[in-house]
Image (tube, rainbow, N blue to C red):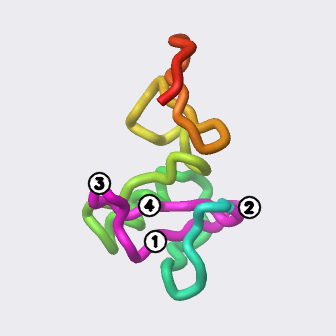
């Protein structure tokens, strides 16, 4: 069985629309997201999201393994650069 995915209807500051898994604490409230469907993989959900918005991107929290920014991870509201010991 797959997981449910949603896309926000308001773009992030970088212009991309975030795709979220069900249960993500950053999923916008009712009326501020679109149900994409139930998928076996995030890649399938991303492909579906791009049908709604060309600039569909992944949530850096619930889909961090699919984020293009490798080497970054979110910890309690800060961004830590892996291996550097510094935080932004």
Callout 1 crowding tier (Cα within 10 Å): few <14, some 14–19, many ≥20: many
48 lies left or right of 60: left
State which tag comes first along the sequence, 2 or 1. 2
- Residue at 57% x, 14% y is 85
Q: Position of residue 81 (x, y in %)?
A: 50, 22
Q: Which residue is the site of mark 3?
A: 14
- Residue farthest bottom in this picture: 31
Q: Which residue is the site of mark 4?
A: 18
- The correct choice, above or below, for 58 with respect to 8 in the image is above
Residue 8's disc number: 1
Q: CA distance from mark 1 to mark 4?
A: 6 Å
Q: Is residue 17 magenta?
A: yes
Q: Which residues are magenta?
A: 1-23
Residue 1's disc number: 2
Callout 2 crowding tier (Cα within 10 Å): few <14, some 14–19, many ≥20: few
Q: CA distance from mark 2 to mark 1?
A: 23 Å
Q: CA distance from mark 2 to mark 4?
A: 23 Å
Q: Secondary structure at mark 2?
A: loop
Query: Closer to us: mark 4 or mark 3?
Result: 3
Q: Secondary structure at mark 3?
A: loop
Marks counted in the figure total 4
Q: Nearer the viewer, residue 29 or 5?
A: 29
**Do the numbered discs 1 and 4 sit on residues whose CB atoms are within 8 Å?**
yes
Query: Closer to us: mark 2 or mark 4?
Result: 4
Q: Nearer the viewer, residue 76 or 24?
A: 76
- The correct choice, above or below, for 9 with respect to 58 in the image is below
């Amino acid at each position: 069985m797959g997981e449910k995915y949603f896309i926000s209807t308001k773009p992030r500051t970088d212009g991309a629309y975030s795709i979220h898994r069900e249960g993500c604490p950053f999923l916008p409230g009712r009326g501020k997201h679109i149900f994409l469907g139930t998928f076996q993989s995030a890649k399938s959900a991303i492909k579906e999201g791009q049908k709604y918005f060309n600039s569909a991107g992944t949530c850096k929290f619930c889909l961090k393994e699919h984020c293009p920014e490798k080497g970054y991870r979110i910890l309690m509201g800060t961004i830590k650069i892996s291996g550097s010991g510094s935080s932004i």
